[in-house]
Image (tube, rainbow, N blue to C red):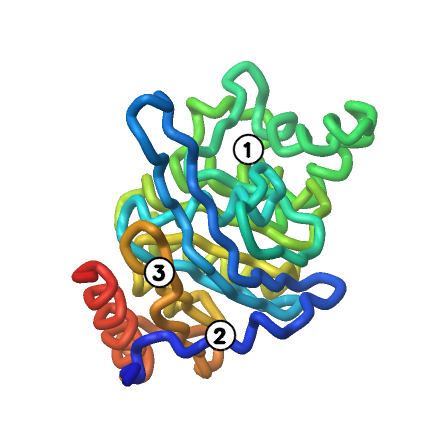
């Protein structure tokens, strides 16, 4: 009989995404073998279901290689599942690496999504410039990527993601390469930014504490093939403190579920 930490059959399978939400229903994916003579491919995901209403932030945690990034690629339409369905608003993916173009300044890097969408350079720059003060980068519009700190680079990359204009953001370990202090600052910054610029968000992270601090719901995946083994609601008002007993308790529950999934 399933424990409290194990997943029950997700009710998300029967929910609709809504205009700006997401509903992933029993999605599976196997990568074909690089050499057909070597047999079966890699079974990445197995019947994964999750849901988010418009404006919710869902965090996905799990062991390395369990298909978290693959799930984001499926949501963004970069891959097609072998089975199951995904109903969601138009989505944009922000990968772990900021992928800023070294020959462009911060302003033009942030405006890149608008340029790709067909806006003129002047129009794109005007739209991007409005966000620099709001997102704490006033005065750094002309800086090249190598002149920015890691946290600043991630802010520019996130600004570029916002300016893509999609209601659904898929964030793949956005702070994974940052030091602990900068990571903590960026977590607070992201929470404040999303309060001002609401979006539906699917956040992949290996940091369970980060998931509990930021998310409305935490989905825990097992080892590959990734299956949903727990889904924890986070009924705590924001902003959340790391030392809050409720935060600590939910962190331990998520870690317990994660540990259980790694032993499978």
Q: Are marks 3 and 2 in contact (CB under 8 Å)?
A: no
Q: Do the residues labelled 1 and 2 touch (CB within 8 Å)?
A: no
Numbered disc 2: secondary structure: loop
Q: Is residue 138 left or right of residue 180?
A: right
**What is the spatial separation of the Cα atoms under label 1 and label 2, in whole angstroms?**
45 Å
- Residue 144: x and y in percent read 51, 22
- Residue 208 quadrant: bottom left
Q: Looking at the picture, does residue 51 appear above or below residue 130? A: below
- Residue 120: x and y in percent read 82, 24
**What is the spatial separation of the Cα atoms under label 1 and label 3, in whole angstroms?**
39 Å
Numbered disc 3: secondary structure: strand
Task: Write the residue at 32% across / 76% down.
Answer: 6
Write down the residue under mark 2: 10
| Crowd class of label 1 (few under 14; some 14 to 19; many from 20; radius 10 Å) | some
**What is the spatial separation of the Cα atoms under label 3 and label 2, in whole angstroms?**
13 Å
User: Which label belongs to residue 140?
Assistant: 1
- Residue 129 quadrant: top right
Write down the residue under mark 3: 221
Quarter of the image containing the C terminus?
A: bottom left
């Amino acid at each position: 009989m399933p424990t409290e930490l194990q997943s029950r059959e997700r009710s998300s399978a029967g929910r609709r995404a809504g205009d700006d939400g997401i509903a992933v229903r029993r999605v599976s994916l196997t990568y074909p073998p690089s050499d057909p003579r070597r047999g079966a491919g890699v079974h990445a995901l197995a019947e994964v279901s999750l849901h988010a209403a418009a404006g919710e932030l869902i965090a996905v945690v799990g062991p390395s290689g369990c298909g978290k990034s693959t799930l984001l690629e499926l949501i963004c339409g970069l891959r097609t599942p072998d089975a199951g369905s995904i109903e969601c608003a138009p989505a944009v993916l922000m990968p772990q690496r900021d992928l800023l173009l070294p020959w462009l300044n911060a302003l033009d890097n942030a405006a890149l999504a608008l340029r790709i969408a067909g806006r003129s350079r002047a129009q794109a720059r005007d739209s991007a410039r409005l966000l620099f003060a709001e997102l704490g980068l006033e005065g750094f519009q002309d800086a090249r990527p190598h002149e920015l700190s890691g946290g600043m680079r991630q802010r520019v990359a996130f600004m570029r993601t916002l300016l893509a204009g999609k209601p659904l953001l898929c964030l793949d370990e956005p702070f994974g390469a940052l030091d602990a202090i900068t990571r903590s600052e960026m977590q607070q910054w992201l929470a404040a930014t999303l309060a001002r610029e609401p979006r539906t968000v699917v956040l992949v992270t290996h940091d369970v504490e980060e998931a509990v601090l930021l998310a409305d719901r935490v989905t825990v995946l097992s080892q590959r093939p990734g299956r949903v083994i727990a889904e924890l609601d986070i009924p705590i008002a924001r902003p959340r403190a790391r030392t809050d007993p409720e935060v600590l308790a939910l962190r331990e529950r998520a870690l317990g579920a994660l540990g259980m999934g790694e032993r499978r």
